Amino acid sequence: MANKTHNFFISNNDGNFEQCLKCSICTVYCPVSAVDPLFPGPKQAGPDGERYRLKNPDFYDESLKLCLNCKRCEVACPHDVRIGDIIQRARLQHSPHKPGIRARLLASTDLVGRWATRLSPAINTAISLKSSKEFGHQMLGIHKHYDFPTYARQTFVKWFEKNALPQQGGFEKKVVYFHGCHVNYNDPAPGMALVRVMNKLGYGVELIDDEKCCGNPFMANGMPQRALQLAFRNMNSLRQIANKGLEVITTSSTCTFTIRDEYKFVLGLDNADIRDKVSLATRFIFKKLEDEELELPPVRPDFKIRIAYHTACHMEKLGWAFYSANLLRQIPGVELVMLDSLCCGMAGTYGFKTENFERSQKIGQPLFNAIKEANVDAVVTDCEMCHSQIAMSTGMKVLHPIEILDMAFS
Amino acid sequence: MKFSTIIIGGGLSGLTAGITLAEQGQRVAVLAAGQSRLHFTSGSMELLGYNAKGEQVDCPLDECRSLPASHPYQKIGVENLASYAQMAKKLFANAGIEVVGYETMNHIRLSPIGVLKPAWLTLGDYITANMARQFPFQSVLIANIAGYIDMPTPFLKSAFEKCGVKCRVVEVKTPMLENLRRSQTEMRATNIARVLSEQSAVDQLSVEINRSVNREQAILIPAVMGITDNSIVQYLRRMVTRPLFCIATLPPAVTGVRLQSRLRKYFLSLGGTYMLGSTVREANISSGKILSVAAANLPDQKLKANNYILATGSFMGNGLIATQSGVIEPIMNLDVDAPLDRELWTAENLNESQPYMEFGVKTALGLHPSIDGKTITNLWAVGAVLSGHNPIKLADSSGVDMLTALHAATEIIQTEKNR
Ligand code: SF4
Ligand code: SF4
């Protein structure tokens, strides 16, 4: 079992590049290859390049930075090659660039968030000011057209402690909620909806005392050691919860996917005992309904909404879009259009970066077009970063599936 | 989750069965571990191209009668093949895929490296010849895209010339396509197709093609257009001054991706559930029946159905796995037709037919596989996972994929009616 002395750079490299059949199917589904000829593509950047890098790390090519870590290549691969993991690890191991201020700023969702929520009115004004956007663009490389997520006045945790905690003891059944950084600092709405929905379904909600950022932004921004520290803390908490016989639910597809897959395949940790213990709330509810342990509460009679469901990349990798979509389909009054599963181009913090902005928009274009054609009241997705990108790029209202449930039940 | 039928494998075979069942109103789930061999399909389907002696077959339906009893066509009854072949054609039409060809008479397709091969159905945008190797034109212009290397034009030119067709090769350049050449590795058919999905890019291309053509009767381009449907190919056809056809390219093939995505879309439109990235790892079997299956990415989730179809393909999609101790079917450890002695797996001469090509799941009764000799009555194995045929030697792979799937679906529909 891994422990605190575990070092990312010496942990065993478990990439299964030798499983590659050279069929090239992965290259068809890479959203970056589709728009940028300078990206070598999943096959070349992944299994093909890995053979060279193992011989001599000088073969590492900075163009690997263009990879979104969307894992769509892995989902497409008929031979189970962990292409995205190979690329992600190669970047963390070989990139000669040390993370700069921007990388630290974008990655530290937790630390930055804690300060920003305290100062939120000032920060939000600052974020939206043209002059600071220009500053961000010039000095930090955060693209000025990008609406950087604003910060909530009050963290989700504060809201929970004040408004929800007292009632949670009144439920016989309990469930633990891993809210993630975005719900806590930027957009508490899905978290608040989750508490209300779970209460309606008869579950009291508990939070995790020592919840940490899942670590994904640190992996994406070249700080694997920091990601490891966070992963240890979270795995520790999750083990304690599992020992108490409680289940953990989430609303963020990326946090969930990170704990399930990236801890193991990118950070090289042994997460076998907890990887299947964290479930998206939609999957949790769907399964309880299916097993007839739950019944849907009555839905407002006037409830009617036409929504388009967008499958986030990490949702595609989890293979769980089925749960969210089919839970929503069970709600009377919901008319659901399933969008083709396409990358929105945001990929966590990728689209924020000035050098990526245009590429990011180009990647998302087919999805944005499909959304415009869908003629719906709102777009629904399980990913908070897709939420930002779609809202900014299409002007549509974007909601979390749990928010739809909350609207229907209230 | 409960379905009428669960299909493991999402390629041509799995989708053929899935569509047929969903058309009858069944609740069907397709579980696919990844994308499929369809991506290699170079525009044509084969029913039976050669007989056991390696001779070219003109009338595939007639020739099927002389196949050995171990061949999948014999297992589903050669007398049924004609109606299944008709069903397959209808399925393509329903899914919005235009094909030409007859099960009663093969035609000639042109492989990406210029080999002339018998085929059963070919997508409407491709050039074909009759079995006497006569093309409908005396002179053609091959207009390749500069920098695109997955279509070896010298081979194609010589193939046409051998058939008495005059052939000239040109390379065309357009600003939008030139941009792709900045890539060292990814000037692939599918990436070109993304650029050529815009009318403005096709307009540029048509200007260049029209400029290049002399007195040739037809224009041939690599099949690098139309990832989701062939409307953009139709558009180009209207813009150029001669009849225009496509030539198959090396994989990944644009038309293969098109076939996969159209079939899948059609299946979804019928209410089917398609779960990509769901690798089935185990099945719960009791007294000769599957009770449920489980996928790696769906822990604690029982996937239940009345009927199950195994359409996992051969070695490429991990439908079969070669281990030190033998060839296995990894999900249920079904009985397989493959010798334990590894020496017998391959023939020394690489050009000879390779024994491992015929390995696969053993089916005693129809398409029902068995475990330790005990038949699994609610499971059907279809497509490339079946033993008893060499798809390279016989050129029968799409036929086996589709017709066995149609047979299984027909039996399942009957079983459900009797229920
Ligand atoms: S899809 Fe998988 S097997 Fe095929 S080239 Fe890509 S990594 Fe290799
Ligand atoms: S993870 Fe996504 S962006 Fe990266 S190589 Fe794979 S498909 Fe392309």
Image (spheres, grey):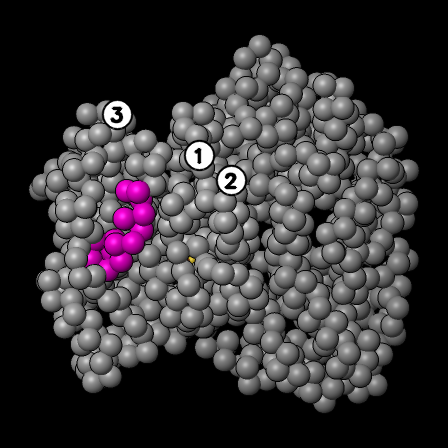
Image mark 3: chain = A
Give the dominant element type of the magenta stretch: helix, strand or loop.
helix
Kind of residue sitting beneath label 1: Leu
- Is residue A16 located in the magenta-colored stretch of the structure? no
Res. A330 mark: 2
Judging depth in this view, the residue of A70 and B81 nearest the camera is A70
Q: Earlier in the sequence, mark 3 or mark 1?
A: 3
Q: Chain of mark 2?
A: A
Along the viewing direction, whichever of A232 and A176 lies nearer the viewer? A176
Q: Residue furthest top?
A: B287
**Lower position in the chain sequence, tag 2 or tag 3:** 3
Residue A378 drawn above or below residue B165: above
Whether ligand 2 has any atom under 8 Å from the Cβ at mark 3 is answered as no
Q: Position of residue A328 (x, y in %)?
A: 48, 44
Say which residue label 3 marks.
A172
Q: Residue at x 65, y 66 (%)?
A: B226
> Residue at left 44%, top 34%?
A296
Taking depth in this image into account, of A17 and A408 the one nearest to the observer is A408
Q: Which residue is mark 1?
A: A296
Q: Position of residue B96 (x, y in %)?
A: 74, 56
Give the structural element (helix, strand or loop) at label 2: loop
| Contact flag, marks 2 and 1 (Cβ < 8 Å) | yes
Asked if badge 3 and badge 1 are on a common chain, one would say yes
Residue at disc 2, CB closer than 8 Å to ligand 2: no
Query: Callout 1: few (<14), some (14-19), or many (20+) C-alpha neighbours within 10 Å?
Result: few
Q: Is residue A67 above or below residue A252?
A: below
What is the CA distance from the residue labelled 3 to the residue labelled 1? 18 Å
Q: Callout 1: residue from which chain?
A: A
Task: Identify the amino acid type marked 2.
Answer: Gln
Q: Which residues are magenta?
A: A182-196
Residue sitting at x 74%, y 28% = B413
Q: Toward which corner of the image does residue B391 lie, by quadrant?
A: top right
